[in-house]
Image (spheres, grey):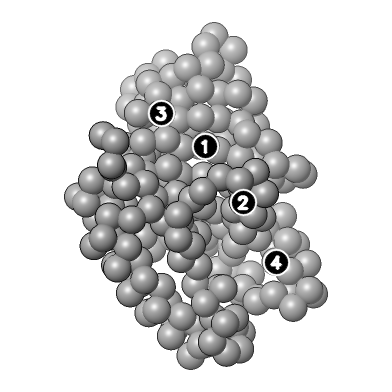
Amino acid sequence: MVNQPTVTIFAGVNGAGKTTLYFLAQEKGINLGYRVNVDEIAQSIGDHRDRQTQVRASRIAIKMRKVHMDDKLNFNQETTLCGKSILNLFDELKENNYKINLHFVGLDSPQTAKERVKIRVSKGGHDIEPHLIDKRYYESMQNLLKVIPLCNEILVYDNTKNYELIAKITNEKIDILKNVEWFNNLISEKIKSQNYSYDNEYNYSSRIKL
């Protein structure tokens, strides 16, 4: 559909590198529509470390997103992919005939995410409680599996050391581009739940129907 609106969602645990991936796309001249980013809104209206400012920024972001969805405009946003509200958003986007492009950035462990957040804080960025990072690390991956049927395209990156595109999922068909343990384990779990035969290294085929 020529005029189908597109949403680009950057997802992953805190510290994974979602914002950096967005700016890399910008540097390449890729137009992702209007940016809806809670952290950036918070920085523009007050102290982004203040809880009340964060709540206010979240409300503004929701209103901005609604305006764009009502007008069928392209936009992009970041999310940890945790909680019921983000899953509801995917359903809402689908109901509004949006094309959903998801960029998921993963890391090898919650500890790596915590270290990245510490670096961010040392540069003036906002902090996240370690126990929340632990929770979000695993929840974000489980929710990735849940939204696969709703997405038109998913690009999966491993950013444990440097950004590497490791998989592409289109219409629930996955192309494994590089074997990375955390992602292989996640996909193996998905395949086992659907009674598929599988090889954890995916040597027999790089394409799997989920």
Residue type indicated by callout 4: Val
Query: Mark 2 or 1 closer to N-term?
Result: 2
> Foreground mark, 4 or 1?
1
Measuring 56% from the left and 73% from the top, which residue is drawn there?
40
Badge 2: residue crowd in 10 Å (few <14, some 14–19, many ≥20): few
Q: Which residue matches tag 1?
A: 155
- What residue does disc 2 label? 26
Give above or below for 166 relative to 11: above
Which mark sits nearer the N-terminus, 3 or 4?
4
Marks 3/2 in contact by CB < 8 Å: the verdict is no
- CA gap, disc 4 to disc 2? 23 Å
Categorize mark 1 by other alpha carbons within 10 Å: few (<14), some (14-19), many (20+).
Answer: some
Identify which residue is drawn at 45% across, 60% down: 34
Is tag 4's residue or tag 2's residue first in the polypeptide sequence?
2
x%, y% of residue 166?
Answer: 61, 31
Residues 127 and 94: in front is 94
Q: Which residue is mark 4?
A: 117
Whole-percent x, y for residue 2 in the image: 29, 36
Pointer 3 residue: 170
Mark 1: which amino acid? Leu
Tell me which corner region of the image, top left, top right, bottom left or bottom right, holds residue 147.
Answer: top left
**Tag 2: residue type?**
Gln
Which type of secondary structure does the marked residue at label 3 adopt?
strand
